[in-house]
Amino acid sequence: MRWDLFCRVIDNFGDIGVCWRLAADLGSRGESVRLWVDDPSALAWMAPAGAAGVQVVEWTADTPLPEPCDVVVEAFGCDPPAAFVERMAATRPVWVNLEYLSAEDYVERSHGLPSPQRNGLTKWFFYPGFTPRTGGLLREPGLIAQRQAFERMPWLARHGIVPGPGERVVSLFCYDNGQLPGLLHLLSDTPTLLLAAPGAAQRMLETAGTSLPGLVRWQALPWLTQPDFDRLLWACDLNFVRGEDSFVRAQWSAAPFVWHIYPQHDQAHAAKLDAFLARFGGGPSVRALWHAWNGLGLWPSSLPPCEEWTAECRRWRESLVAEQDLTTQLLRFVRQKG
């Protein structure tokens, strides 16, 4: 089929990150995708080689509007141009609103519901999620096999990363976070190499300067392509991730991870965080660590036991692998509605 996928880059890189992964996954399965994005600049480092079957269209007020494709996906309720929607009334594509990821109960109730529109079309809500009654998670064919065959030391060496003997390797990708001193104190229990992603993580560590604990050192990472970011997560003993895209990729890595959820002024993010923890499990020590990093509680005295934590992450990944991936489910959903 032919797809129009609309994406607005609100802030950070989660919107375009999710949309690019979906577009590339569809293209790899023989679909044809026009990815409409208002700010495609991040793709220069995120996906410099492009992807088979994917055409990127810079979406501005002056962009010519062609005939709608067979399927129109608006990511996160971004609303296609009004004139384009008018043309959809004549061609009648399947119209899908790909929603934000959440573990909250409303996702199961809302997934797949119709929303009749004034132009006679129906917009369908498609919710990613963690259970059989949701749309699943993005997972490219062969991803888990690639993860299992991965060797971390050669990859680290190719990127100029040389851990010391017995040094713990930790990735840090986060929003601005006043809890960094508490995290650095916690990591100082053993020699630690902190690999900091561009943006807030590097800014905060540069500000910390010489006040880092003696057993903690850090190294700045360049912008990484999506495949290399996945391999960064595979190469680390512990991953601090944020938002939606890196959060999902950390779960496929099956290494211990901590999620920095996007903070909301009304504290709605606290309920979203706890909804995921209720499904994931991980025990009181994992919950305490996640709460502390998100400014929702006090720091625990130590990190969770590594072996137990890793076993929990592997168990969780296996439960997710047992469900169909998002792209497979979306393809089936669209065929049914079309």
Image (spheres, grey):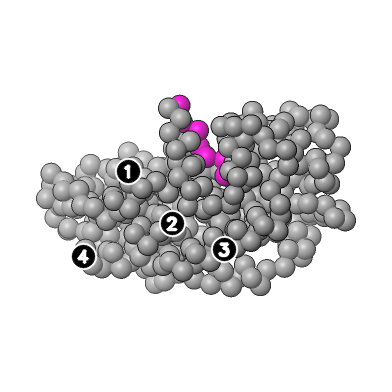
Q: CA distance from mark 4 to mark 2?
A: 26 Å
- Which image quarter is the C terminus in? bottom left
For label 4, count other residues whose C-alpha is less than 10 Å away and answer few (under 14), some (14-19) or many (20+). few
Quarter of the image for the N terminus: give it. bottom left
Disc 1, disc 3: CB below 8 Å?
no
Which residue carries the number 4 mark?
338
Q: Which residue is mark 1?
A: 77
31 lies left or right of 293? left
Chain-order first, disc 4 or disc 2? 2
Residue 336 in picture, x, y percent from top left: 23, 67
Which-is-in-front pick, marks 2 and 1?
2
- How far apart marks 1 and 3 lie (CA) works out to 33 Å
The residue pinned by badge 3 equals 315
User: Type of residue at label 4?
Assistant: Gly
Amino acid type, mark 2: Phe
- Residue 246 is covered by the magenta coloring: no
Q: CA distance from mark 2 to mark 3?
A: 13 Å
**Identity of the residue drawn at 46% across and 60% down:** 138
